[in-house]
Image (tube, helix red, strand yellow):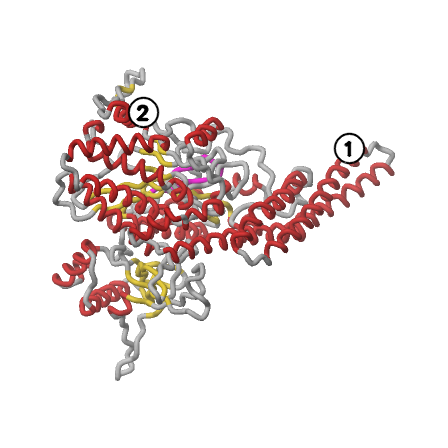
Amino acid sequence: MSEVLNVEELFASKVFTRATMKERLPKNVYKEVIKVMEQGGELSLATADVVAKAMKDWAVENGATHYTHWFQPLTGITAEKHDSFVSHPDENGKMIMEFSGKELIKGEPDASSFPSGGLRATFEARGYTAWDITSPAFLKEDATGVILCVPTAFCSYKGEALDKKTPLLRSMEAVSEQAVRIVRLFGNTEATKVVASVGPEQEYFLVDREKYLKRPDLIFAGRTLFGAPAPKGQEMEDHYFGTIRERIGAYMKDLNIELWKLGVTAKTQHNEVAPAQHELAPIYETANIAVDHNQLVMETMKKVAGRHGLTCLLHEKPFAGVNGSGKHNNWSLTTDNGVNLLDPGDTPNENIQFLLVLACIIKAVDKHADLLRQSASDVGNDHRLGANEAPPAIISIFLGEQLEDVVKQLVETGEAAHVLQGGKLETGVSTLPDFTKDATDRNRTSPFAFTGNKFEFRMVGSADSIASPNTTLNAIVAEAFCEAADVLENAEDFDTAVHDLIKQYLTEHQRIIFNGNGYSDEWVAEAERRGLPNIKSMIEAVDTLTTEKSVKLFEKFGIFTKAELESREEVLYETYAKTINIEALTMIDMASKQIIPAVISYTKSLADTVIAVKEAGADASAQADLLKTVSEKLSEMKAALEKLEDVEAKASVMDDVKEQAFYYKDVVKEAMAELRAPADEAEMLVDKKVWPIPTYGDLIFEV
């Protein structure tokens, strides 16, 4: 019988929570820390010293020997450098364990070896990490021991953001400041800030680790670059929400335990659509903490998988022919006195504050659809978006029947006199309860869907940081709030002005609203007719960062400077080129050293069989036909391999980073596809005992 888990006791046991601070800090110090957390400002060095000592004592009591400033550079993952608490011995030779306020507040990692897009040269090495006091410190435990992790921002010597967190924190302050202006207009004098809240659902694949280690493409690229489809895929729809297998269930149990210890509110777990695919969803929380926790979720998923002889794949499309993985980003805004600005209430047609907030968001998404699309772009996501398994690459908003009807009334008449109700769901079974339906169905094909009291941004890739999409969301909504507040704060007749503004925004930006099938070809044509952008790939979206419109937006609220935006543009082009380069080199290596030799060996075996059968006086036509077919695939592979080697060599020496990225997209990726096609066809012909790598059937059905 398994041991009983006390989740309440377990939860956040590895986190330096407010409760722990309250218990360990003097009252005046605790009050100062909370004030800075909630209202901003800086701790005095004396206070920081007290906090640092309490944090160190707590960490040491829990087995910690080192601390690290844990930050999120432009790699999209996390970084850490460990320093021990060891200080100089005292006069008796006894080791002193110390951690000062200065060490807590500021770190100094090398800034030259992280992606910077030109903000830092190799000889300009100094960078700083700064403690994010609003995100709690935590303990990580692995083979290196127990490490105290202090969440931080990462900036250059000149103050430029070199990370994902700094712009996110700036955007949170921007949207809070502008949202407070909105709620003040409606008489809320108690709220002092508005918090952006996020709940990111995380999809992932699990495969057997021994099989994974026999696939160089999974090791180097995170996805299969070769692979014929298995006889069965997801067409039976039997994996989604299906019974969780024992091995996977044991993994999920351990994953939950580790995440709960770290204060991550892991709530939901289930099998996803594709074989070997699963999902974990947390309860939503403050945006920067949600970003930190999602990084911990991805890291912990990988770590726990190893304990179970598994490997966790977070790539957006590890297997062709079955659904890939995304990360639905549930986003909302709530005042610090508990009002959700996206809660329509029972009568949304009469909730003027909600309608103004909704109209502002619709305006923001329409105006900056290109930026929102860019924020969800990464190399792996190009395999998903618009591929009939994820939202299309075209940004649109789903409101549902109830709100769409309210919007239609407001646009046509300026008033919404009525609101659609959900009615009763009658099951027709006497022992089952009838209950009130929601007024609106859901739309799984919409990239930006209203889901009751939040928006679900469904385009984000499974391996990507959620910092960028939330930074963009906060920024574009802050701008819309600011422009609305500028009008309404100076209005002589507020009631008339707010009604007119809502109607204006909804009328001017209703083109972005679409409640239909986002997967259909008809929608692509309709979106083009409406003038909505259809940005089909990551690198086609990159230059949206540095348009005059974008620079004006981000600089207005101090979220990015033009130089910071240009640096990110360069980093994204570099990342794309480097990623496809690694994939191309991996394909060349696998084809040259594994697949082609295996096919050559098989053709020799076939040829020997043909000769032997003929010498025996029997009909060898079947064997000869197979030999001919396999030999043709071998010739196609050899020609495609030579082409890929040629174009990859040309791409690798290009100087212009944008030109190089587009060459990898338009030329190298095409050559990769030309090599994969005959290889996958050969896999269907060659004896499985000869095929050198585990097949799709081995990987996704034998877990």
According to the image, label 1 marks what residue?
622
Position of 481 relative to 577 (above/below): above
The location of residue 583, given as percent across then percent down, is 57, 51
Tell me the residue at 31%/70% (across/down). 85
**407 is higher (above) or lower (below) than 569:** above
In the image, taking residue 417 as reference, residue 241 lies left or right, namely right
Q: Quadrant of residue 227?
A: top right
Which one is earlier in the sequence, the residue at label 1 or at label 2?
2
* Residue 219 visible, this angle: no
Q: Indicate yes or no whether the magenta region holds residue 99.
A: no
On screen, residue 489 versus residue 310, left or right, reads left
Instruction: Find the residue positioned furthest to the bottom.
Output: 91
**Quadrant in the picture for the N terminus:** top left
Q: Is residue 278 magenta?
A: yes
Q: Which residue is mark 2?
A: 401
Residue mark closest to the camera, 1 vs 2: 2
Whether residue 3 is visible to the viewer of this picture, yes or no, is yes
Amino acid type assigned to the residue bearing label 2 in the image: Glu
Quarter of image, res 31: bottom left
- Alpha carbons under labels 1 and 2: distance apart: 61 Å
Q: Amino acid at mark 1?
A: Ala
Residue stretch in magenta: 270-281
Q: Residue at x 15, y 63 (%)?
A: 29
Crowd rating for badge 1 (residues with CA inside 10 Å; few <14, some 14–19, many 20+): few
**Label 1 secondary element:** helix
